[in-house]
Image: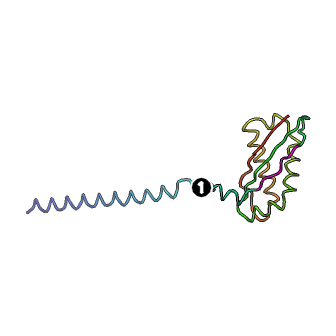
Amino acid sequence: MENEVKKSAKNRAILIVFSVLVVCGIAAYFVIKELAPKTAAAEPTAEELEKITVETEEITTNLADRSFIKIKFKIQADGEDGKAELEKRLFQVNNIIIYELSGMKTGDLQGQKGIRHLEDLLKGRINKLMQEGIIKKVYTTEKIIQ
């Protein structure tokens, strides 16, 4: 009889330890999930992008080092309201593009870093204009420097 009591107590202890481990594991999962950095939202589909992007006309202007550039952009707003405002402000956007490019030299626009710098610069400047939405991304779609 004493053996059965010991076995029962031993089984109960094992069950309690196992239950505590399971509860701790579940709690740890949720804590880690909550503290993990949030991943960016999924990229919009092509159809969604079409509804929220505006394309500039091809812009040709001089650079500071007397060369010239032909360039074109697609600008992604945060939604359809932002796109509508962006379309109304396109003349201001073109002005910003020409203004910023006129102070740059050919070397400033070379390579991936140069393009990324220009896109980020334009995004920031255009966002200062926006009242109904924000610019999420500026894409360079054409670029020729001579």
On the rendered image, what quadrant is the C terminus found in?
Answer: top right
The residue pinned by badge 1 equals 42
Quadrant of the rendered image containing residue 40:
bottom right
Asked if the magenta segment contains residue 55, the reply would be yes
Position of 32 relative to 103 (above/below): below
Position of 101 relative to 137 (above/below): above
Q: Which x, y percent locates residue 17?
A: 29, 58
Total numbered labels: 1
Q: Is residue 20 left or right of residue 43?
A: left
On the rendered image, what quadrant is the N terminus found in?
Answer: bottom left
Residue that appears at 83% across and 62% down: 88
Q: Which x, y percent locates residue 83?
A: 76, 61
Quadrant of the rendered image containing residue 129:
bottom right
Quadrant of the rendered image containing residue 29:
bottom left
Position of 101 relative to 23 (above/below): above
Mark 1 Cα-neighbour bin, 10 Å: few <14, some 14–19, many ≥20: few
Q: For numbered disc 1, what is the local secondary structure?
A: loop
Q: Nearer the viewer, residue 19 or 106?
A: 106
Asked if the magenta segment contains residue 140, the reply would be no
Residue that appears at 78% across and 64% down: 84
Outermost residue, left side: 1
Q: Is residue 30 left or right of residue 62?
A: left
Q: Is residue 100 left or right of residue 18?
A: right
Q: Which x, y percent locates residue 139?
A: 73, 48
Disc 1 residue type (three-letter): Ala
- The range drawn in magenta is 54-60
Q: Which x, y percent locates residue 62?
A: 90, 40
Residue that appears at 36% across and 61% down: 23
Q: How is the image coloured?
A: rainbow
Q: Is residue 144 left or right of residue 12?
A: right
Residue that appears at 57% across and 53% down: 39
Position of 100 relative to 49 (above/below): above
